[in-house]
Amino acid sequence: MKSKIHEYQKSNIKKMSKKALLIIALSITVLSCNKPATAVKEVKTAYVDTSVLMKEYTEAKDLEAKYKAKSEEKGRQLDAEIARFKQEAAGFQAQAQANGQAWAQQKGAELQKREQQLGAAQQQLAQELQQESGKEMDSLVSGVKKFIKTYGKEKGYSYIYGTGDAASILYAEDKYDITKEIIKELNDKYKSATPKEAEAKK
């Protein structure tokens, strides 16, 4: 008899335990449902057309003009040498007939050597200017990226995308385009640079 009572009590305890667990589980579910939903933070996004930015950014335009002038200045002397060479090469045919084969061979070899030297000088000049302008352009692009990063943080953007020649966005509404704002801010910053800073960049 005692064992039956004991079994009955054990059975009741198990049922009560299961019931208690079920009540606890239901309570948690109800509480979870009643818990106010946390507000989803709005993701603020925008994009910048980098090709337009580089065309309209005053510092980029100044840099381009600087190296165009430098190229013309350094190329002037070389152009004069090339013009002299072309003149000499043009008269070579007539002089060769008058001065004989031995002279023609020697002069022809000289002209060929000079042509190669002038070609190498042109290539070297182009490489030098490319390296110089490349360094400055890399520095400018790095500065623009830093500026956009700071601008994005200050204005509360989650993302600012870049479009242009290497576009990563296939479509975006015009209202998300902040290119003009960035250009204005960058140009204002560049204009306000002290003459010493502007001179250092030249």
Image (tube, rainbow, N blue to C red):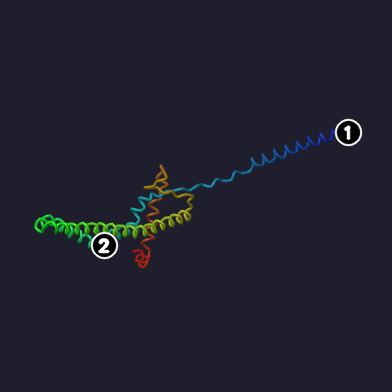
In this view, the residue farthest toward the right is 1
Question: At 50% across and 47% down in the image, what residue appears?
Answer: 43
Q: Nearer the viewer, residue 95 or 137?
A: 95
* Element marked by disc 2: helix
Compared to residue 86, the image places residue 194 above or below, namely: below
Query: Tag 2: Cα neighbours inside 10 Å, few (<14), some, or many (≥20)?
Result: few
Residue 56: quadrant of the picture: bottom left
Q: CA distance from mark 2 to mark 1?
A: 111 Å
Horizontal and vertical percent position of residue 106: 17, 59
Q: Is residue 127 left or right of residue 89?
A: right
Residue 5: quadrant of the picture: top right
Q: Nearer the viewer, residue 165 or 38?
A: 165
Indicate the amino acid at tag 2.
Answer: Lys
Query: Tag 1: Cα neighbours inside 10 Å, few (<14), some, or many (≥20)?
Result: few
Compared to residue 32, the image places residue 105 above or below, namely: below
Horizontal and vertical percent position of residue 91: 12, 57
Question: In which quadrant is the N terminus drawn?
Answer: top right
Question: In which quadrant is the C terminus drawn?
Answer: bottom left
Question: At 19% across and 57% down in the image, what residue appears?
Answer: 109
In this view, the residue farthest toward the bottom is 196
Horizontal and vertical percent position of residue 147: 43, 57
Q: Nearer the viewer, residue 100 or 170?
A: 100
Indicate the amino acid at tag 1.
Answer: Ser
Horizontal and vertical percent position of residue 39: 56, 46
N-term mark: 2 or 1: 1
Q: Is residue 192 left or right of residue 9?
A: left
* Element marked by disc 1: helix
Q: Which residue is mark 2?
A: 74
Question: At 68% across and 41% down in the image, what residue appears?
Answer: 28
Q: Which residue is mark 1?
A: 3
